[in-house]
């Protein structure tokens, strides 16, 4: 299937089966804002629980908090967001469409990269087994020209950003002949900086009102609570603080469904370490975080590391975990070694000492921080896009979500074969027994085949069917989503089987 069509199918599937709806759809929607439906919220909550337990329960030195979305405005001065949380934007005068200038340039470079790949592919076909890719890449004139182009544009672009020279950024777009994907024209406005934070007013009278921001990341809530948690929890370095919560960014180009939203959720953890030990902990968390993703059972080939060559001025190491979404490899999680930048900034702006006193060595220091920051919605999208599949079964197509059983929105569907003869009553009894431990669904409408298909489409790992034999010998059939096989089992074994197969422990023990 073409990737674009595949992506459209996922978006349509999310709506049809109650995973994700456009926000305020009744009023024609609000761009880049989404609501999670009855199945979406279950899946999302399960991902959160998986992350929360993996971080806080499995690491005894990591604790959680839940800080407020509103924070003192000076927090965002100290963090650098007021002055520098900007994207360079540019408008096309003909189409009136707005773009991120950096994204236009990056897409342009990616196109040149694709040209290189095509040359390599062509040559590989031509030369067959004798093809030496390295030699080709380092000697072919056309490939070398393309590579030199990428290098020179990247260099010019990086230096323009460093110097905050927006005219230079515009010049690159003009000189490279980058056109608007909608109008096809090169009629561009100047480039402007656009701050991504949403502002609002605190207080009822506007005169005395204070400008506050909707937080663009959850991390600052952790930094400003460092001392509170360290002291009240009697934490010793190294230790971590984890948080899950909403973040808001006024994204200029908000496409790609829940990949880039204006209101989204992050799962972040700040790990406070002794200066000088940060790179060791950085490697440790890199490994742990990749394991967390892989334990969900998605093919490792779907993930890759992206090393930041150009580091933020305060960072001394940074990697992203990228995932192959239907629109290509994109950032899913960032793992960054942020030195003592954030705590020192808050120390300077608040005038209060933020340090750790090590009573064994008698030293005081501002801890260094290793941060792991993953998008909850992007994790959701990674799971859905890996889980969605269409299978040919006889002359029918079955749509199935092969989600990990522990994360599936509904764990068990209890289905009486027919709506009479006491079968619904027995099915209800089974459901009443299971519902304290598992999210179950009871369904008696439509043929059993149709009911199975509906459960496949939302990823329910087990369907329990109650038939006439059940009344006689207390057995039911259990149908497995992935291979559609069925087994007859006694009802007293049911709860044990489904509980063990849907237990989050199955994922957590892989970490
Ligand atoms: P990008 O480069 O894609 O804009 P970022 O580098 O700005 O992302 P971070 O500030 O590192 O992102 O945020 C940490 C994580 O939060 C990201 O890895 C991503 O999973 C998630 N995230 C960031 N922005 C959004 C958004 N607009 N919508 C959904 N998730 C987001």
Image (cartoon, grey):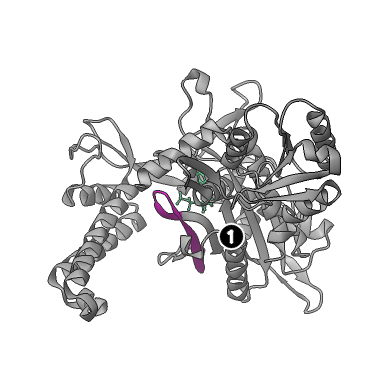
Number of marks in picture: 1
Q: Which residue is mark 1?
A: 297
Residue 7 sits inside the magenta stretch: no
The residue depicted at 22 percent of the width and 78 percent of the height is 131
The residue depicted at 58 percent of the width and 72 percent of the height is 283
Residue 315 sits inside the magenta stretch: yes
Q: Residues within 10 Å of mark 1 (few under 14, many from 20)?
A: some
Quick one: 161 or 506, which is closer to the camera?
506
Residue 363 placement: quadrant: bottom right
Quadrant, the C terminus:
bottom right
Q: Is residue 57 shown left or right of residue 181?
A: right
Residue 157 placement: quadrant: bottom left
- Furthest residue to the left? 141
Can residue 214 be seen at all in this image of the molecule?
A: no
The residue depicted at 21 percent of the width and 75 percent of the height is 128
Can residue 7 be seen at all in this image of the molecule?
A: yes
Residue 420 placement: quadrant: top right
- Name the magenta segment's main secondary structure: strand
Residue range in magenta is 312-330
């Amino acid at each position: 299937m073409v990737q674009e069509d595949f992506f459209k199918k996922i978006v349509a599937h999310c709506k049809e089966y109650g995973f994700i709806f456009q926000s305020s759809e009744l009023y024609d929607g609000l761009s880049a804002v989404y609501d999670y439906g009855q199945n979406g919220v279950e899946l999302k909550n399960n991902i959160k629980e998986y992350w929360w337990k993996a971080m806080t329960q499995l690491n005894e030195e990591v604790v959680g908090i839940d800080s407020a979305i509103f924070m003192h405005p000076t927090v965002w001065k100290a963090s650098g967001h007021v002055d520098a949380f900007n994207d360079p934007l540019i408008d096309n005068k003909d189409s009136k469409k707005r773009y991120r200038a950096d994204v236009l340039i990056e897409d342009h470079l990616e196109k040149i990269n694709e040209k290189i790949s095509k040359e390599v592919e062509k040559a590989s076909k031509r030369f067959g087994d004798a093809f030496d890719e390295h030699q080709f890449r380092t000697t072919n004139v056309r490939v070398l020209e393309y590579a030199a182009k990428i290098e020179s544009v990247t260099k010019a672009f990086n230096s323009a950003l460093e110097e905050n020279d927006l005219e230079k950024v515009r010049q690159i777009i003009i000189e490279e002949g980058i056109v608007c994907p909608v109008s096809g024209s090169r009629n561009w406005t100047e480039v402007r900086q656009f701050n991504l934070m949403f502002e609002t007013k605190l207080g009822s009278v506007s005169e005395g009102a204070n400008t506050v921001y909707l937080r663009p990341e959850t991390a600052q809530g952790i930094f400003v609570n460092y001392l509170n948690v360290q002291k009240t929890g009697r934490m010793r370095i190294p230790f971590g603080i984890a948080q899950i919560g909403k973040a808001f960014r006024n994204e200029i180009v908000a496409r790609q469904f829940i990949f880039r939203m204006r209101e989204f959720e992050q799962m972040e953890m700040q790990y406070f370490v002794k200066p000088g030990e940060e790179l060791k902990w950085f490697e440790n968390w890199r490994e742990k975080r990749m394991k967390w993703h892989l334990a969900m059972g998605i093919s490792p080939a779907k993930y890759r590391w992206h090393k930041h060559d150009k580091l933020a001025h305060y960072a001394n190491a940074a990697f992203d975990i990228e995932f192959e979404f239907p629109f290509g490899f994109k950032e899913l999680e960032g793992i960054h070694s942020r030195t003592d930048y954030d705590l020192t900034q808050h120390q300077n702006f608040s005038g209060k000492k933020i340090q750790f006193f090590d009573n064994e060595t008698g030293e005081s220091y501002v801890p260094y921080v290793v941060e792991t920051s993953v998008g909850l919605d992007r994790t959701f999208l990674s799971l859905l896009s890996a889980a969605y599949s269409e299978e040919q079964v006889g002359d029918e197509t079955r749509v199935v979500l092969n989600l990990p059983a522990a994360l599936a929105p509904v764990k068990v569907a209890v289905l009486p074969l027919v709506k009479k003869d006491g079968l619904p009553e027995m099915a209800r009894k089974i459901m009443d027994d299971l519902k304290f431990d598992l999210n179950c669904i009871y369904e008696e409408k439509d043929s059993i085949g149709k009911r199975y298909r509906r459960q496949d489409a939302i990823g329910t790992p087990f369907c329990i069917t109650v038939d006439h034999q059940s009344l006689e010998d207390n057995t039911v059939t259990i149908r497995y989503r992935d291979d559609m096989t069925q087994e007859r089992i006694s009802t007293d074994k049911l709860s044990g089987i489904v509980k063990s197969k849907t237990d989050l422990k199955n994922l957590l023990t892989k970490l």
